[in-house]
Image (tube, rainbow, N blue to C red):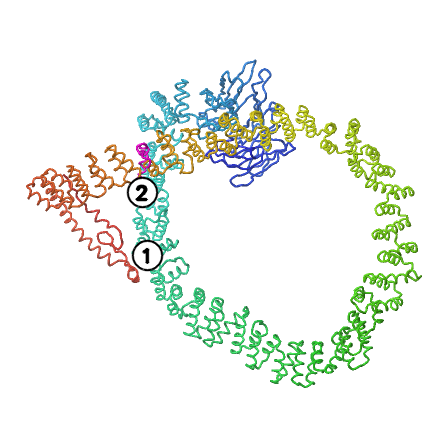
Amino acid sequence: MDSDKYICVRETSPQNNVVIIDMASPMQPLRRPITADSALMNPSSKVLALKAQIPGTTQDHLQIFNIELKSKVKAHMMLEQVVFWKWVTSSLLGLVTQTAVYHWSIEGESEPQKMFERTASLMSNQIINYRCDASEKWLVLIGIAPGSQERPALVKGNMQLFSVDQQRSQALEAHAAVFASIELPGGDHSSTLISFATKTVVAGQIISKLHVIELGAQPAESGKPSFTKKQADLFFPPDFADDFPVAMQITSKYNLIFVITKLGLLFVYDLETATAVYRNRISPDPIFLTAEATEAGGFYAINRRGQVLLATVNEATIVPFVSIQLNNLELAVSLAKRGNLPGADNLIVQRFQELFLEHKHTEAAELAAESPQGILRTPETIARFRTVPIQAGQTSPLLRYFGTLLNKGKLNAFESLELTRLVVSQKKNHLLETWLTEDKLDCSEELGDLVKSVDKDLALKIYIKARASPKVVVLFAQRQEFEKILIYSNQVGYTPDYLSLLQTITQTDPQGAVNFAVKMSEMKGGSPVDYNTITDFFLQRNMIREATAFLLDVLKPNLPEHGALQTKALEINLVTFPNVADAILTNGIFKHYDRPRIAQLCEKAGVYMRAMQLYTELSDIKRVIINTHAIESQALMDFFGTLSKDWALECMKELLSANLRANLQIVVQVAKEYAEQLGINACINMFDEFKSYEGLFLFLNFYVNSSEDPEVHFKYIESAAKTAQFKEVERITRESNFYPAERTKSFLMEAKLQDARPLINVCDRHDFVPDLIHYLYVNNMLRFIEGYVQKVNPSKAPQVLSQLLDDDCPEEFIKGLLLSVRSLLSVEALVDECEKRNRLKLLTPLLEHLVSEGSKDVQVHNALGKVTIDTNNNPEQFLYTNSYYDSRVVGKYCEKRDSSLAVVAYRRGQCDDELVNVTTRNSLFKLQARYVVERMDATLWAKILDPENPFRRQLIDQVVSTALPESKSPEQVSVTVKAFMSANLPNELIELLEKIVLQNTAFSSNPNLQNLLILTAVKTEKSRVMDYIHRLENFDGPAVGEIAVGAQLYEEAFMIFKKFNLNVQAVNVLLDNLHSIGRAAEFAERVEVDEVWSQVGKAQLRDGPISDAIDSFVRAKDASQFTNVIREAGKLKAYDNLVRYLIMVRQKVKEPQVDSALIFAYAKMSRLDDLTEIVAQPNGCVANLLVVGDRLFNEELYQAAKVVFSHIGNWPRLTSTLVKLYQFQAAIEVAHKANSSKTWREVCFACVDTEEFRLAQICGLKIIIQVDLLEEVSEYYQNKGNFDELIMLMESGIGLERAHMGIFTELGILYAKYRPEKLMEHLNLFSTRINIPKLLRICDEHHHWKELSYLYIQYEEYDNAAATIMGHSPDAWDHIQFKDVVSKVANVELYYKAIQFYLQEHPEILNDLLAVLVTRVDHSRAVDIMRKAGHLPLVKPYMQAVQNCNLSAVNEALNELYIEEEDYEMIRESIDTYDNFDPIAMAQRIENHELLEMRRIAAYIYKKAGRWQQSVALSKKDNLFSDAMETTSQSGDSVFVEELLTFFVKEGKKECFAACLYTCYDLIQADVVIELAWMNNMMDFAYPFLLQYLREYSLKVAHLMSYKNQDDVHGKLDHNLVADSNMYAQLLPLALPAPPIVAASGTFDAYAGLPAYGLLQSRGSTSPTY
């Protein structure tokens, strides 16, 4: 808490949070999850500073965040640990490390700046505060240290004062310090003071002092005032001898010093004199944090309980206290003047009188200026100074008084007036302006009137400050600053006469009048003058432009209710300025005008485009649209976009019908623009309907390139052809892909165009070549045929050739045609076509010509080969020598003619399938075998050796007998052998290999063939394998041996390995395959190889005795199998043999597993000495002792485990081991070293199990500070039934320094379950440190209703609290508490439940409850509840308190109570004050009441309800004639008056008759009075009436005669005004009403709807006077 604005709290449970409390709204804390070691809130803004220590280092990470902007401002890594930090200003953080002090500004990118080093006296101190003065030139650091030996309980305080300017420090003894600024008399600047408090031990005496010293004081010889050093004693009570100051605050409001001590003592001293003012204890708990409360003039403090305290000065009592209790009058006056406090009025007035008597006018002026609450600043004081005579050459005392007031501050209203009179009389206006700027004068209307005569501008400023609105408006109008009038009126809420102002402005500035009118329309709450009135105001003066400008501005919102005004604005402009109206419509400003009316006017004005947009009938639009000469084309285009499809087509047809030639272009453009909306087909049909091929062509020309509609493309071709656009026909047929080919072809053939190119395009692209050639040949258009073949598509020559042949075209033409495009032709297709027609020889010249030109085209040579074969012109030579033909094609062609030629062709092209087929079909197996062997293709071999091949046997015989013996190529042999192997022909393969390998051939020594022979025998002839092993020498022994093992030929494999001296592989065969450990051991004895012994040992380890295996491993010196040996020996528990083996292994390798196994074996054999020796070896033991120890622990070898864990210092595991050995005391000692929650928990639970509760509590206190383990410990204790011990543990835990919320909560739960009598005390003490939601559930389960309601209140769940209290009132109800709770509930239904609850259980204090709920409940509902319960009198005080709400239910209920109590005075007061009740029902209820006053009230109610006859009847019945006359007079009905007069005459009530004439004077006809009086002899009583009547009418006649002459003059003025009325009325259409005409009397015509000014003001009426 660095200021009185925010409190920042760091929570550590249940999770790490930072809670920010805004002191302006403390019930709405801001909580953020932040894991930081420390958090500081900025004193003035929502900026948060965070500090967190980097784990494992002494560095601190600092960050500054802006909470409102949710952004990081700055961050820095401090290399030193920050032991204390604080906001010294709103933009500066003070950081204190172990050695120095830094300042870190939050502005810019600067890093912390070192300010000074800590002095030696502060090196070992705990820093408790750091401050700087307002100028940041003086810094002070405060720390505390342990007390001296003679007084250790008294903490020692040290202070380091540092001067930034001098860069020097001074060390002092002090516990707290604070800076202050004070203005000394005669000084030109404020002085900086430091006040500090000390408490030291000197010669065994405790001395407590308060010091106040000026910093940077000027020397005495400088002549400037200085502050005298002050000091005072701090008086500590005996009980507080070891208490010491922890904080100091100075309130600048009163210049008082607050000294706060640790134990809650508060000392108050005067800053200027160091005089003691007050001392008291403000907190029973230690205070550790304070901050100045600037506004309150005190300070905030926080104590250890978490309470936030506010200490401040009681302004009403401090001055009397100082003057009376302390008897310090001088200090009392000083405090009163300094803080503007009451209580010293008499002293100050007395002193003022004394100064005046002593002629010390200057001192008296200063005293009056500084008098508290301005008690001397009165007119009397001014008058007194005015009476002082002015000395020659001196300033007037009055002016000196005013000068003193101005120096001190602002003048009050009376002082401002008096001073201004003096200045105005001396014509020093500039002084007034200066004082006004400095806010030295209290502005008032009187002051403005006074200044107005000399300076209107200055007067205006004064009027504005004084809120003299009428005069401000008048001045603004005089200055022609009309806009400021509205701005000012809106600001101050003043309503001037706007129409008069508007008329005034119009005379001088028409545009200003418009602006003023617009400003009026923008006023909050709507325009004060109707828009129609303002518009007519402008129109009456022929100000059409101004009226239009006004309407355009005010109608911008475009509201439906402004439809008439929008229509008016358009009408007046269509009549006068059509362009303006068109512009308005174009901008779319108006939406709610009369569209038909405006459309007609637009049509008449020639604004056809706008008329069409406004018309809603098709016939109107068609009538207007034909005026295309006056309509802009683009606008017409846009208009068509607004029409529906059908209307648009109708309008287009109308345009074509009206003038096809003139309107064709616009129709085409519309069709282009809106083709998608109108439909292309609809547009095409429209043009077809008018036979307009030109229009159709122009329309489709725009759309055809993007359309995919076949109809569109066809119509475009058709229209282009019809309009002779042949280039477009040719282009579209060439480029388009969407026209219907068949239909287009037919159309072009029928059109018989001279240019056949369009038809050629269609037929070529859509494969109608035969039809095209036939058409061209029949129509003798041969040149187009040649052009088509030569230039358009030579690839279609075969189709052209076929059609020409079918049409019997001459061969010479065909040959010439082919030769002309010889290099572009598809020879293959030509050959096919000629073959079909048996005309192949026709191509011979062409083919020979192509070959002679060097053509290498396969098709050319294929065709030439076919011709050569057909002509039998030495075909073999062609097949062998020609390298360009396709072997498959030519071979296929030869098969039907000569199979041998086919074999030649296929062999040349390696056509395997074709060659096999033809040789098989013709039984040429020898040729086939030779080809296959030479081909060396595995795929081909696989195909011919396929078992499905019925000719496989014949082929194999030819291969074995002929083809392979003829071969000399090893590769051919190899491929053949592989093919036999792949074909799974082992018998044939063995036979073949025996001939090759065993019969002394060139391939006999080939290792691969020997390997193949043996392997083949392994697969098929196992009996022959051993013979091959003995006969062959060049095979691969290791590989073949492995294969033999895989084939289960173990003896053969053993023989192979033995033959090749592969001893390890051989012994493996004996062990793994033959499973003969004995033969293996014999073999090992014979060969004596370590590897062999190792293999034997492995086998023995698997299947033999462990001792034999270990012997074998020892003979082999094999340490590699220690893992398996250790495992097997462990299974068999052969630890003796294992130790022997492991000792050997340790000599060869250093393996942790070996040493671990050896240690475990020693432990199993109880050889603890050997175990200790091996563990203690400095470098000899490499075992993983932690794992070994865990294994020993798991095997329950606890003594051995103790040795291991002790050696490695594993305190947690050692603790567990000691627990297993029941050595609990030793376990606790080791657990302190382990310092692990898990370890403490284990020891704790073990102690609980063995009922060692003292030791369990020691452990438990270490566990419960961990939030996660607390609940587990509690459950364990409870499951064991140890409730008392658990409560003792928790009670001890709440006193821990690290006690958290969970401990307090768990203790509360335990109290709720097992000690309910202690629960409430616990809640009262620690409610802020309890997890309330968790405890709520427990209290609810165990029916602790009082505690449950208390928790709900603390948790601010007031609804639940109220429900609990009402539901369980015997236990939970307390009236004061319940009132506080029910006033804060959110569910309003609880209010009424509370009312019913009190009505049932506590009706005597129900009104007290209702007083709390008076602003929250529905009073009607509350009264209804009481009415139904029949207890309305019970809540009478409540109803009287809320009757000012004027609710019918309350009023009627109270009236009923008053009637029952016959309290007529209260009834009369109630019905007069509160009118919301049923008056007729009430009157009917009491009109027959036995009390007269009640019946009189009934008559009074009838009168108020307008039931005059019933009221008068009741009054007459009770002889209340005065009431009857008053009621009759108020009725305004002359008939009632005559009836009452008649009644009085009949009853002979002459006095009442005369009184009635006076009361009802305005309603009585004179003839009726005279008649009644004359006939009943009452003329004497009627004369007063008649005299008044005659006087009134004589005055009226005199007034009428005086006005007659004035009317004659005004009549002439009326005639001129009518003649000169504005011309606008003549221009308006019939739809507009005529404007109002000003009448001669100064009134307005009835049309204007305005009051008739002048007439009523000049004519008065006379009231009767008796």
Residue 543: mark in rendering? 1
Q: Residues within 10 Å of mark 2 (few under 14, many from 20)?
A: some
Q: Are marks 2 and 1 in contact (CB under 8 Å)?
A: no
Dividing the picture into quadrants, the one containing residue 1252 is: top right
Residue 344: mark in rendering? none
- For marks 2 and 1, the one nearer the N-term is 2
* Mark 2 to mark 1 CA distance (whole Å): 29 Å
Q: Could you tell me the amino acid type at mark 2?
A: Pro
Along the line of sight, the residue nearer the viewer: 1153 or 517: 1153
* Left or right: where 1578 falls relative to 1149: left
On screen, residue 1250 above or below 588: above
Residue 666 visible in the snapshot? yes
Dividing the picture into quadrants, the one containing residue 1238 is: top right
* Left or right: where 415 falls relative to 973: left
Q: Residue at x 85, y 71 (%)?
A: 926
Q: How many marks?
A: 2
Give percent across and percent down for residue 1373.
42, 29
Along the line of sight, the residue nearer the viewer: 1495 or 90: 1495
On screen, residue 745 above or below 1210: below
Q: Residues within 10 Å of mark 1 (few under 14, many from 20)?
A: some
Q: Where does the magenta region start and end?
A: 1428-1448
Give percent across and percent down for residue 749.
57, 81
Q: Could you tell me the amino acid type at mark 1?
A: Met
For disc 2, the marked residue is 470
Decide whether the magenta segment is chiefly helix, strand or loop.
helix
Residue 141 visible in the snapshot? no
Give percent across and percent down for residue 400.
37, 28
- The kind of secondary structure element at disc 1 is loop
